Image (cartoon, rainbow, N blue to C red):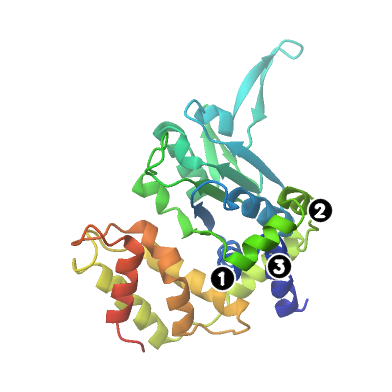
Amino acid sequence: MDIQFKLKSLVDQLNTVIVGKFEQTQDCVACLLAGGHLLIEDVPGVGKTTLAHALARTFGLQFSRVQFTADLMPSDLSGVSVYERSTEKFTFHPGPLFAQVLLADEINRASPKTQSALLEAMEERQVSIEGQTRALPVPFFVIATQNPHDQVGTYALPESQLDRFLMRISLGYPDRAAERELLLGADRRSLVASLPSLLSPDELQFLQQQVAAVHASSHLLDYVQDLLQASRNGQWFLQGLSPRAGIALLQAAKARALLCGRLYVAPDDVQAILPQTIAHRLIPAGDAQRGAIEQVRAMQKAVPLP
């Protein structure tokens, strides 16, 4: 398999649906190649759900979509056991969680109880139902969308669940040229429905193995540790990054390096994915007007490059 040709095909196909957002689609591909869950946060109508559908189809994964609402129950995700009169036994009927990709649409409109039901699934790739542990399909990804917290009917995701997402990205409004293409072009849903699958399960597993094999030098690891330490000194954030966040940062940087055609991680890879990988795990300290992403960029400038 020509790895670079395959990776370029993945990104190019996504860009036929989500126009004018090359960096964001590249981040999404890197996130899934790194084996992580993806959170897409933005206002309604900018293509969050369309991007999630396009990712699942392009990666050739079996997926299910759940519209999260305030009355959604945990069992609506995991499934239930139903008594079958013909067999006089309870039969388990799996819910939408038992898919290779769960598209959790507007995840922050569900109650905290339902949000928490995803924790075990996202971290352990399994769920405990009625005293029995059931394994989820391999691979298993959650691609979630959420609206800004200040919109009516939203519940902020708890820090423990945000930490399960490898990346959080925002699409933003398209530029004028991209918006004109959207206005004149075909319906996005029709385009998504016609997308071919570009990967088989074996090819996806091979690409993920290639990501894991990307080399990170001792100087690069020093730089990652310097960033982790800077996040913990109290100058920029109320609480620093955990070791798990450091592992996620390195894994995402490896995936981006492979997308750029390199078998080693460069400092540029770390800098390119830093805000998307760590900002959602941090609470800014000091000036309340400055958001987490701005604080991450300020910290990034203060940490010397290797």
Q: Is residue 138 visible?
A: no
> Residue shown at 27%/80% (left/top)?
302
- In terms of sequence position, does the residue under pointer 3 or pointer 2 come before the other? 3
* Secondary structure type for disc 1: helix
| Residue 194 circle label | 2
**Image location (x, y in percent) of residue 88:** 70, 12
* Secondary structure type for disc 2: loop
What residue type is disc 1 on? Glu
* Left/right of residue 5 with respect to residue 289 in the rendered view: right
Q: Nearer the viewer, mark 3 or mark 1?
A: 1
Find disc 1 in the rendering and name its residue. 23
> In terms of depth relative to the viewer, which is nearer, 100 or 234?
234
State how far apart marks 3 and 2 are (Cα). Answer: 15 Å
* Secondary structure type for disc 3: helix
State how far apart marks 2 and 1 are (Cα). Answer: 23 Å
- In terms of sequence position, does the residue under pointer 3 or pointer 1 come before the other? 3
| Residue 139 circle label | none
What residue type is disc 2 on? Ser
Q: Residues within 10 Å of mark 2 (few under 14, many from 20)?
A: few
Find disc 3 in the rendering and name its residue. 10
What residue type is disc 3 on? Leu
> Residue shown at 68%/66% (left/top)?
15
> In terms of depth relative to the viewer, which is nearer, 304 or 116?
304
The answer to which image quadrant residue 175 occupies is bottom right
> Residue shown at 64%/18% (left/top)?
82
**Image location (x, y in percent) of residue 291:** 31, 60
The answer to which image quadrant residue 154 occupies is top left
- In terms of sequence position, does the residue under pointer 2 or pointer 1 come before the other? 1
State how far apart marks 3 and 1 are (Cα). Answer: 13 Å
> In terms of depth relative to the viewer, which is nearer, 122 or 172?
172
Asked whether the beta carbons under mark 2 and mark 1 sit within 8 Å of each other, the answer is no
